Structures are given as structure tokens and as C-alpha cells.
Amino acid sequence: MAEDGLRIGIGGLSSGLAVVLNGEDRKESSQKTHLVSYCDGFGDQSVERTLEHIFDLPYKCIKPLSCSIDAEVVRSVIKNEFLKYHTNQKTGTDRKREGVLTAGGDGCKHQVIQLEESSICGDIRIVKQPLIMESHSLFSSARANACVWKGKWMYEVTLETSGIQQLGWATLSCPFTDHKGVGDADDSYAYDGKRVSKWNKEAQDYGQPWVVGDVIGCCIDLDGDEISFYRNGVSLGVAFIGIRKMVPGLGYYPAISLSQGERCELNFGEIPFRYPVKGFLPIQPPPTRSSIATDLLNCFRRLIEMQRVGRAEFSSVEKLRRLKRFVSFEKLSHPVSRGICEELLSTLAAEDGSTKYISCGPLLSLIMEVFRMHPPHDYMSLDSILDSLIEFPESRILFEHIISSLSTFCKTAPLSLAENCPYSGSYIYLALACHILRREEVMTLWWRSSDFDLLFEGFLSRKSPNKQDLQGLMPSIWWSGSCEDVSNEASLLLTTGALSEIINKVEEKQRDLCRLVMQFMPPTSPPQLPGSVFKTFLQNILLKNRGADRDSPPPGVSSNSVLVSLFGIVLHFLSEGFGDICDWMKDSGTSDIGFLHRGGQQAFPVGLFLKNDPHRVDIPRLGGSYNHLAKSHPISIEQHEEVIRWEEGCMDNVEDRVTHLSKQKPCCCSTYDADFTRISKDSIRHMGKGSRGHCSSIRERSAHVAAECSTSSLNDDIADKPSTSDQSESEFGFLPIQQMRYVPRENNVSSATLKEEELLDTMLLLYHLGLAPNFKQASLYMNRQSQSISLLEETDKQIRENVCREHVKRLKEVRGVYREEVMDCVRHCAWYRISLFSRWKQRGMYAACIWIVQLLLILSKEDSVFLYIPEYYLETLVDCFHVLRKSDPPFVPATIFLKQGLTSFVTFVVTHFNDPRISSVELRDLLLQSIYILVQYKEFLSELECNEAAMQRMPKALLSAFDNRSWIPVTNILLRLCKGSGFGSSKRGESSSSSSVIYQVI
């Protein structure tokens, strides 16, 4: 079959070009009856012999040419000679495809396989043509319009979400209802990776948990009467045996059931499979002319190889053997490539469906093979292919399919340490896309596509590993205090280092792609400014993901990896700068300094808070909903245009002030970064001990804060009642702001221009929607790891002390369970550290905390604006602060974590934990919990003792907050401050090093 020859570049790419004129290759060639002469002379071969080589024709089958070579001559050779020898008619193909029938068809192999609309139960909507679909009802099911009753068949499902989906096969007799779908009846079989089960009326354990980006192969063997499933080309084993035989025309239909919000893409054979399974055929056959198109592309491959020979990419001996035999590449390149392209496009136009099949399969395979999987990439050879194709207007559809395929491959590309490390994952697809999209005509083609946003999201996607994938990536596990082989520590360190490098390469290419989009100026009238396309994309992403932070997100939200990638991209631009592009975004004289690290005078347009943009409609503000505030605290038009300005550090005491312009720099820009190499080497040692701490239930608002609240504080018993604090609004805030001023917003810059302050606002919302859930999950794994290590150590102790053989046997079985749990947690914690918490991200997040807390302190002096600040500003600040505080290994020593940059955080939490302007009691609780955590550590307590606002405001504020809601956390704070002074005496043997003599005096 043609599809068997297209696996190069789909399931895995060829390791290199076939050697031209290699004798072994010739023996295996389908053209066994012709030979190319091997003469000993080193003179140039004629044009005729060179064309015979390019088109893989028998020796001297081309008669001497009487005219100069041009595209018409080449096409004549193709029509008269090439097609004669390369028709590749597959006898027996029809017999192999017996046993499949398309509903409403006559069995002909050109029927398009799609969902049968009449079979749909529920609400299934097409997200992207033809077969990316999403369920908008609680449970939706559908069948394809083709069935099979004999032979071995398969189709692929690419997971866009990873929730409850039932994928498999069903007959017409299987009913679809609001509660029953695929696998819920006789003759209906399904696999569900969310519940790790197979379904045939009843559920049984089967397979592996799936993740977003997995490609599930659904295979049915009607000769052996069994059904099996594959995950990313790896068999999950036979799922069902002894399935019922069917008669011709009444067989098994591909069928799916989706829960609400679940999304997937089906491929019945419209394009080559990502992971074809040997012996199984696609339900939809490849185009009949695909073999001819593939052979034409092989001709292009040989032409490119001639170019490479001329560039000395072979050894000197091999070059002499080859270079002297053929006419130079320059003489033949243009006419031959043009002739091949003309014939290729003509072939594709002659049959529906062939353009997409060839573009996504053989053509993309050739392009990637020529480009090479890892640096140094062959840009020159790739450009020769692109230049040849782009001359023809008909090639636009080819480029559209290529861009779409590259985007899809980014979503499904797995990480691998075995091949092309560190250029694994989606690197190759991003690198290729970046090079292709440097051509303005291709970028314009992509931008005009109705799927521009969806494809852009695909490029920013990153496939995460499941439990089994992590076991493969990190086979050796070690943690502090473990009994594992000491060599495992070095092995794990090497593995995590390699994975970090892979992630860095992928993120670098994602940023390159975003820079290209930023620089792109669409051909519109009036012309759009640079950055407008990227800005529009960000706005569309935020609008699309309204409600993504709910327990049950609405249908249509983006993959979490897209939000995480975008956050990282924006953070890098703001922290590390934009590189050599986008000068239109930078202030004069600051081009080499990232926005978050510039220091000096800061500015922020308050209109960002006062606007009710579509993506902000449902976002709560500190003072309540926008509609409520618009009525109770209306804003003037002038305020919308104001920009607030202040000097960095103006809220801190002058003698203790640390800024980016002072001699002592903040932690994010201090010389402590020079010690990072040593710290990173210690990361493995922190895996066990560093994750132990004060544990309790995790609150939805901030896992990092709640995880450290004492389990003895009875927080779960606090009544949800309103605060009775009587503190006046005028008491909030502390230092007078002498360096703050409002100025009108500049009107000489279009609102379409991408501004760094807007990027900062977007970044904080992306953190709230995308990063916070990941850090919460990481916190859960850290807590589980700590608990499992304790249980493992206790079990080891019992084994050593126990003398009963039977009891020891049971203890060893339990120990094996605890050990597996610890290893799983160590792997997941390492993965979160690698993927989310690289050093530059910590640096940027620290700088962002400085920036945001100073902005909040400044705006807290202006009630009319402070009330409109979105809640996610405060949530992100607190969450990010505690993520950095608990980082493993530590970002900086605890002794300087607050002192060198974040003293303003202390000022903010102690002056706003009972601020009545903050309408959310959960947010005020979050600030109160932060105070409780700070007083537990002597390094942080010392900052509370040095902070003037804390000394003057906090004791009184704590007492005023002692109400029927907050009395327990307030009591815990006071106990911690006054422990050992007669108020909450220390327990026997308990250290009171974190108590405060200064606060006890107050």
C-alpha cells in the first residue's frame, strides 16, 4: 500500500538520505530491471544521463535532447518516460480492502469517511474541519459513516483534552442515549484512558492513563476476532477477544462518546497515520495517485542530494566519485524543480483529497528529512524546495496543510532522551515552522487562515508525560535519606539536566515564533502596527479562556500547556528582554534591560483596570463586580487616560531601600545568581527533605499558603461569617507617597501597539489561569512525597525491629507500595521543577512580585482605582511569593529573600489583611495566612520586626480582626509571636526561636 511507504516522517523520520547510486539500494528498488552505468571515467555525464538518475530511469532510456533543458522538456520526460516506469499500480489492492463499506456508498474506495450526522446523540460540534470535535452536552456519542466486517482496520484519535472519552467500535444495534454510549452495550467496545478502563457493558481495568496530545490507535482484527488499542504507537495489549463475527454490509463502526467539554480529532486515513500499526489498514484509503506524487517527491530528493554533493557534505573520495559524474546542480536545478512541481501540482489537482494527504505525508516528510532533525539544519536545501513550490499560486494550499500539520505535531510530540537529545519534543516542528514563516507570503497565508489562533495554540502546546512516560524518562530515582543505589543520584541528576535542556530548546523556539508574529505587519488598509497581531491573539486567548479557573470549565477552553507556554514567553520578554527586535516597544536607552528589571521611574496606565474588556467581564475586582463598582464608584473619562508614575522603592524605608538602581541589588539581579550552578546540583538532595513542612488541607485559593497552616488551628471549623472589623479606610497604607503622580496618557501611539504594561497584565492573568493550578498540583505531590517518605521510614523501622517472619513478609509488601508511591512523587516533583521552575523563570517571577506589590501599594492610596484592581493581581502576587519561598532548591537564602527586594510585600500584607475595601473574605484570609507563615520562620520574623508599618499597624489590626470568622488564625499568629512569654507557653522541648521579644513588649 502507498501508506506503507509514507511512514518516514510520520511515525519516525528517516535517519538520512538514501545514498545515490548505491548498489544495495538499487537491488531493493522496485525498478529491478534497469541499471545505471558505472563508468570509470571522471568526465561529466550528459544531461540525459543526469535526468535518468534524478528520475530513477533505466540507462539510456532518454534519447539525446536536441534543445536546451527547460521545464517543458522535463515535463515531457516525466510524461513519456517517468510515468511509464513509475505507475506503481498495486495489484491486489482492492482485494486487500474487501470488508469495508461506506454508508450511502457502493463500496468504492474514494468515499470520504466522516461522522454520520444521523447517529449523533447529544451536542457534538466541529471545532476545526473536518474532524476536530467537541461535546457541548453532558454526554455525546456518534458513529462514523463506514463499517468493517472482514480484515484488519484502524483509525487514530488525537486527544485535545484528557477527560472521560470512550473510543472504540460499535454496531448499529448499540443505542446511544444521554447516559449510554460506546462500550455500554453488546457488540460495543471502548477504551477510556481517564478511568484507565475498557468497556463492554461493564468496565475492567485496562491500559494507561492518557494525557492531552496522546494519539490513540483503535484497531480491530476481524480475522482474529479481537480489538486492541495503542497509545502513541505502543500497544496497550489486546482489549477484547472473541468479538462476534459480522456479515457483509453489517459490521463494526468507528464510534466515540465524549463527556462535556471533551475534544478530540479523528483520522480515518484522510492523512497518513501518526503511528501506523503493521498489518492494519486505514478505513479511508489513500488517494489513488499518491504513489505517483510520492515518486515525484523522491525525484526532488535526488535533485537536492546533488546540491549537497556540490557543497562538500560528503567525504573527498565520495565527492570525487559523485561530483564528476553529473551535470552541475546549477544547470538543472531550476528547470527540473519547476517541471517536477508543475507535474506534482497537476497530479494533486486531478483527485480530491490528494493535496492534503500528500502535503501532510510525503511532502512534509521530505521537507523534514532535508531540514534535518537537529542542528546544523540544512536551510539552503530546504529553501530550494520552498522557492520551487512558492512560485506557483496552486502551492498555497500545500503550505496551509504543512503549517497545520506542524502545529498538530507540536501537540503530539513526546519527549525522548534516546533520540536527538536535546532537540527532542516539538523542537524540530517549531524550528521548521519558524524558518518557513520567515517568508512574508507564507506568514500572510497563515494569518489569513480562519484557523490562525487554533494553529498558533498548537505551536505553543507541549505534551506532558503520564506516569509510565516519567518512568521511562527517569528510570533511576533517588531522594535524600533513601536506601537506593547511590549511583541513582548521579543518574537522576543527569536525566533532569537533559530534560531541562530539551525544555529550554523548545521554549526558545516558541519565543522565536512569537517574535516573528510580533514583527509581522499584515497587508491591510490602513496598515496595522507591529505587535498588533500578537496583541489580538493574546486578547482572543484570554476571551476564549474565561471561566478556565472554574471547577468545571466551559467547553472550548485552551489546553493548559498553551497558557503555561504563553506565560513563560511573556515572562521572558518582560524579564530578559526582546532581543534584537521590537525596538518600537522599548524606551530609549533601556533596550538591553528587561522591563521588570529597569528600576528608576515606573509607570502604569490605570485605564487597564477601569476598562470592562470582553475577557474581563466575569473577573471579580477587589471591590466586587465591575457592574457594581460602575454604579457605586463611577469613573470619569479623564481617569481612563491617566498613567500613574512612581519611583521604585518609594514605599520602603530610605535606609533599607533595595532597588535595581541602588548599590545593593534585589535578589533577582544580585551576584547570588553566580552560585546557581552549585544550587542546581543540590536540587536532588532537596527532593526528600525539602518537601517536608507544615501540612494541612489545601485551599482552592492558594495551595502554598494553606499547606503551611497548622493542622491544630481548626481552620476547617471557622464559620463563614462577615468580618466585624471597624478599621477605617483611611488607616490602610503606610508611608506617604511623595514620588507618585498622575499624568495624562500619551496619545501619539496607537492603541493597537503592544505595550509592556499590557503584557504584564496579561501575564498575571495567564498565571492565574494556567500556572496556579500546576503549582497547586506540585504542592500536592510534595506533600504526598513527604508523607510517603515518613511511612516508608516507619515501615523500615518496623521491619528491623520485628522478629515475626510472617509479619515481616507483610511489612515488606507494604513497603513496596510506599516505595513506589515515593518514586512516583519524586518523578512528578522533578518534572514540575524542570518544566515550570527554571532559574530564569524564578528570577522573572521574583521581579514581577516586586513590581506588582509596589503597584498595589501605590494604588491603595487611591480608593477609586484600588477597588477596580482585578482579584487575580492579589492572588497571583501571594501565590507567586509562596512558590518562590518554597522553591526547591531555594531561589535565594531565606535570610535575604525578603530583605533584598520584597520588604514591600510585608508592608502590603500587614496593612491590607483586614482592608474592608477588599470585598472577598477569602482574599483577606489569604493575606492573614501569609502573615501566619511569615511569623513561623525567624528569618521572616526579623523582617516583620524591622518593618515600620508592621510594628505600628499589625498588633492593633490583629486585635480588630479578632472576630467570629478570623479569631483562630489571629490567635495562632499571636501565639507564635508571644510564645514563651506567659501567653501560649512553649511545649516541653519546643523551640521558641520564632517568637518575638519585640512584639511581646508591644
Image (cartoon, rainbow, N blue to C red):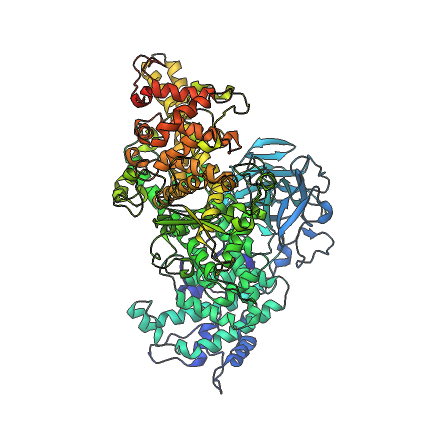
Q: Does 490 sit above or below residue 542? A: above
- Horizontal and vertical percent position of residue 188: 66, 38
**Along the horizontal axis of the image, is 462 left or right of 225?**
left
- Taking depth in this image into account, of 145 and 585 the one nearest to the observer is 585
User: On the rendered structure, is 472 left or right of 218?
Assistant: left
How many dots with numbers? 0
Q: Is residue 50 visible?
A: yes
> Furthest-bottom residue in view?
66
Left or right of 219 on screen, residue 829: left
Tell me residue 137's x, y (percent): 67, 40
User: Which of 644 and 169 lies nearest the eye of the viewer?
Assistant: 644
Q: Quadrant of the C terminus?
A: top left
State the residue at coordinates (28%, 46%).
662
Up-down relation of residue 370 to residue 967 (above or below): below
The foreground one among 916 and 532 is: 916
- Figure quadrant of residue 24: bottom left
The quadrant the N terminus occupies is bottom right
Q: Position of residue 158 (x, y in %)?
A: 55, 47
279 or 502: nearer the eye?
Answer: 502
* Relative side of 562 to 417, left or right: right
Query: Can the viewer see residue 683 in this picture?
Result: no
Give residue 759's position: percent from left, percent from top: 46, 50
Q: Is residue 21 above or below residue 624?
A: below
